[in-house]
Structure formats: structure tokens, C-alpha cells
Amino acid sequence: MKKLLLALVYTALTAGANPALAADADIMLPLVAGDMKKLVIHDAPKSTSSAAFELADDAGRATLEDYRGKYVLVNFWATWCAPCRKEMPHLSELQEELAGKHFEVLTIATGRNSAASIAKFFKDVGISNLPHHMDPNQALASQMGIFGLPITVLLDPEGREIARLRGDADWASDSAKSIIKALIEKHTAS
């Protein structure tokens, strides 16, 4: 009976293994350098929150589910956050260079950030290509385990978290761009 149970468990684990995630980790790990050394690549994908956040310009509400089908780099930030001010131009450059059908940078101001203060922040740092989305009640941030800012999570096309970076980073670095380009290549090849 023990052998049968062990065989069933082994079969279930094998069937449940996710070769796509393993491939994501295999793709990312060799490309990690510089600030990307802070990127924690998960052994298994993690589910994300279904909490809604407010879209820019009072355009309604959305969830992370709305971004399925592409890799999404979700940056949680705030207008009062000095490291966020340093990081935002790097995220803008990454968006400028790589955004498209298979990748997007999604910026979500969490906590008390008025639309006017967000617009001023983006104007002050010269950003025009990133969204001004908000999570004023921190519902999404709380459910995603966002404690401290900035925190950036990388979602796979199935909407699962595959990596997380705490603190600011140079997202315009060769390492960051190489990681995203490799993931996009993998996604377009499958």
C-alpha cells in the first residue's frame, strides 16, 4: 500500500511540474547581474491577487488578470518614495524599449497618492510612457505582500508571480533587458 501511495504522489508531482516555469528560471538565472542580483526568482509560480486597482484618469478599475497573455513587470511605488524617484526613469526606459504584445511595465502607486501628486511626480522625473494607476486603499498591495516600497514583481503570461525584487533597481541595465528579452523570446517561440 505504501508503494502505491508513493507512486501516486510521485506521479501527481511529476504531472504537476511546470516545465514552463523551470524554463523561465533557467532563462533568467544566467542573465542576473548588477542590481538584478536582488531579483528573487521563485521555485514555483505564485498566485496573485484579484483585488482591483484604479486606472489612470478615472478610466475605471482593473485587476492583474486583465494583463494576462504577456509578461508584466508590476512596480508598486509612492510619490513620497525617494528610491522610487530614482528607479522610475529606468522603468520608463524598459517600457520604451521592450513594451508591446508580449511585455508591459505596469506602475501602481499604492497608498495615499493623489492623482495630482502622481502627475507632478511623473512630470518632475520626465516620465510620459508609464501609467498613473493607483491602489489607494492598498488592497492589491496588501494581498500581494507589498511591505515597503518600491517592490517590483514579474508576472508570467498566466498572471502568476515568477520573481520579485525589493528596493530600487536599474531596470534599464543590460541584465534587466536581457532577462525580459529572453522571456519574450521564449513566449513568442511557444
Image (cartoon, rainbow, N blue to C red):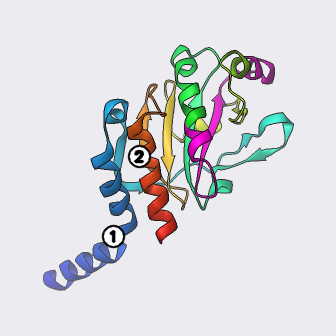
| Badge 2 element | helix
Q: Nearer the viewer, residue 164 or 131?
A: 131
For mark 2, does the 10 Å Cα neighbourhood hold few (<14), some (14 to 19), or many (20 or more) residues? Answer: some
* Image spot of residue 53 (x, y percent): 71, 40
Nearer the N terminus, badge 1 or badge 2? 1
Which residue lies under the disc numbered 2? 178
Which picture quadrant has residue 78? top right
**Who's the residue at 85% across and 42% down the image?**
59
Real-space Cα distance between discs 1 and 2? 26 Å
Q: Which amino acid type corresponds to the residue marked 2 in the rendered image?
A: Ser
Residue 18 visible in the snapshot: no
Q: Work out whether 21 lies above or below 129.
A: below
Q: Which mark is residue 17?
A: 1
Q: Which residues are magenta?
A: 94-120
**Who's the residue at 36% across and 30% down the image?**
35
Which picture quadrant has residue 1? bottom left
| Badge 1 element | loop
